[in-house]
Amino acid sequence: MSNSWIGSSSQTLELKGLVSQIANTDAPVLIRGSSGVGKEIVAQYIHRSSDRAASGEFVAVNCAAIPHDLLESELFGHVRGAFSGAISDYKGRFRQAHGGTLFLDEIGDMPEQLQVKLLRIIQDGRVRPLGADKEIQTDSRIISATHLDMEEAIKVGSFREDLFFRLNVVPLFVADLRERQEEIPDLFEFFANKYASSHPPISLCPYSSALIMTYDWPGNVRELENFCQRLSIFYPGQKINVRSISQQFIPPGMRSIISEVAAIGSGSALPDLESIGLNAADYDSAAAQSETDSLHTLQDFDRWIGIGLEDLDVSEGLKQSMTEIEKRLISSALKLVNYNVSECSRLLKVNRTTLIDKINRYEIL
């Protein structure tokens, strides 16, 4: 993933605010969140926002990617002849990060025997390379990250509780992409430009734009980036309609949404998604309502989605267009349920607090 931190959701803005408060301290930071949410991006941002960016490097180590028998040497270094194959001295990542930041990714996968050594280094800042007869003083800020449930790891004995408390001085959490969907257009545009190569960046038709906002992205930002890179390779410079491209390039979950929308649309008077820019979940929501719910008929649903996009100025770009569509959808849905926010959140399949945040931001009520 890119080392740029894109995002303006309430979750991301709050996180950036916390980072600004702790950037110029030396306090250890533990970043938690699902795989692919961008934990290393946050770590890099902390480093770049600190004075250490001028005095040292940002050095990253994936504790899960390096074989356990090599990880100790990778972290602490070794002297020539310390083991078979050690033909020269090696500084190790701790000393490489002297004056800067050491990022220990997937810290939850660190072998238990190394956890003891890491704990001591955090306490006194001294590293002993393999085969050396003396310790070396180091000065690196430690930022670690994990997708694991650390409390459970401590409970089963795979991670030391005392080390956890040393690392978790500043706890940060990065939310899943599905919890900050408003960032998807910006991220897609960023990745489209990143992978544009010699062609103009790819773009999405209204149907596809709505669809990527509906999809859950279980692989988070990493999955979105891979998707955008894939489309940029096979459809360079094109305006993408996901219904007309090879299905093997579309995530299975997204293919299911497309199929469900197609099934709902057949034999009904529902308008085409592309003509209104409505996301697929709203069709699914309408189809799932019982006769006792707010949406009694497809005719009611037709009235709800009559949000009037004829005057939409698409020249403002994807983000602005999607924002305006979202604003109009929320306004129409609120009117339909007589401004019952709880009912509206159920109708739109969005968390109530998230809906309230959007209502306030758009000044709808």
Image: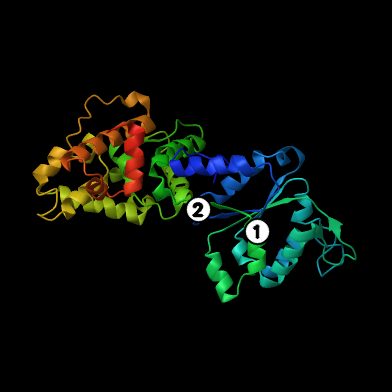
Decide: is 157 above or below 245. Answer: below
Q: Hey, what amino acid is under mark 2?
A: Gly
How many residues crowd around disc 1 within 10 Å: few (fewer than 14), some, or many (20 or more)?
many
Report x, y in % for residue 116.
72, 69
Identify the residue at horizontal 37%, vertical 28% (top origin).
317
Identify the residue at horizontal 67%, vertical 67% (top origin).
162
Left/right placement of residue 101 relative to residue 323 reads: right
Q: Identify the residue under disc 1.
A: 167
How many residues crowd around disc 2 within 10 Å: few (fewer than 14), some, or many (20 or more)?
many
Decide: is 148 above or below 347. Answer: below
Q: Identify the residue under disc 2.
A: 36
Q: Hey, what amino acid is under mark 1?
A: Leu
Report x, y in % for residue 348.
26, 46
Identify the residue at horizontal 17%, vertical 41% (top origin).
338
Report x, y in % for residue 295.
13, 48
User: Quarter holding the C terminus?
Assistant: top left
